[in-house]
Image: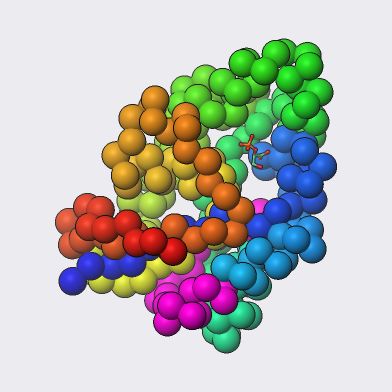
Amino acid sequence: MSGTLILVRHGQSEWNLKNLFTGWRNPDLTEKGVEEARAAGKLLKARGIVPDLYYTSALKRAQSTLDLMLEEMGIENVTIIRDQALNERDYGDLAGLNKDDARAKWGEEQVHIWRRSYDVAPPGGESLKDTAARTLPYYEAEILPHLKAGKTVLIAAHGNSLRAMVMDIEGLSPEEIVKREIATGEPTIYRIGAKGELAEKVAA
Ligand SMILES: O=C(O)[C@@H](CO)OP(=O)(O)O
C-alpha cells in the first residue's frame, strides 16, 4: 500500500505580481492567485482525492491557498498543521527588492545563482541547501511516517521549500534542481511506498 503526497505552491501573491523578492515577508494572494488556488482545489476534487492530513507554512499566501482549496473540495472542520519549517526560503537582504532592479545592480547571472543554485545563499538569507536543512527534517519526522502508513497528505507551501522536497523525493542532483521551476497552483502528486521511497509520480 502506498501513500499519496500532493504538493501545491501557493497561487500568485501580491509580491509575485509586483516582481519583488518575498521570502518570509507576508503578502496575501492576488485575485489571480485566488483563482489558481480554487482551480487546484477543483482539480483534486475532480480526481476524487480526499486527503487525511493538511500541512502549510506560517505564511498567509500558502495558508490562504490551502483554505481556498478546501472550500472548493467541500472539506470542512479539519485540522490544519502550520509550521514555519515549510516557509519560503528567507531571501535576506533581497526581500522587498524588485527582481529586475536586482538584475540591473548585480547582473543576471548572479541573481540567477541566488535564486536557483543549490548552495549559494543570497546576502543575509538562505540557500536552497539551508532551506532543505529545516524543511526536510520536518518532512521526514512529521509527514513521511503518514505516507509510509498509506495516508494521503496535502502540503500547500512555497517555490523553494517545495523545491527542497522535490529534490529529495525525486533524488535530483544540485545541477538538476537548478532547472526545476514550480508553478503557482499546479499540484504535483507522488505515490510514496512503505519504505518512504518514490513509487510513482502521477500526472496531475
Ligand atoms: O520571491 C520569492 O520568495 C520566491 C518565490 O516567489 O522567488 P524566487 O522565484 O526568486 O525563488
In the image, 171 versus 126, the foreground residue is: 171
Q: Check the image and report above or below for 199 versus 166.
A: below
In the image, 67 versus 85, the foreground residue is: 67
- Please state the quadrant of the image where ligand 1 appears: top right
Residue 192 in the image: x percent, y percent? Answer: 26, 60
Residue 102 in the image: x percent, y percent? Answer: 76, 22
Judged left or right of residue 186, residue 150 is left
Judged left or right of residue 19, residue 190 is left
Residue 7 in the image: x percent, y percent? Answer: 46, 58
Quadrant into which the N terminus falls: bottom left
- Is residue 196 shown in magenta? no
Residue in view at x 79 percent, y 63 percent = 31
Judged left or right of residue 42, residue 178 is left
Q: Check the image and report above or below for 47 versus 131.
A: below
Residue in view at x 47 percent, y 42 percent = 163
- Is residue 54 shown in magenta? yes
Q: Which residues are magenta?
A: 41-62
User: From this viewpoint, is residue 130 visible?
Assistant: no
Residue 75 lies in quadrant: bottom right
Q: Check the image and report above or below for 64 versus 72.
A: above
Residue 80 lies in quadrant: bottom right
Quadrant into which the C terminus falls: bottom left
Residue in view at x 54 percent, y 29 percent = 116
Residue in view at x 49 percent, y 80 percent = 46
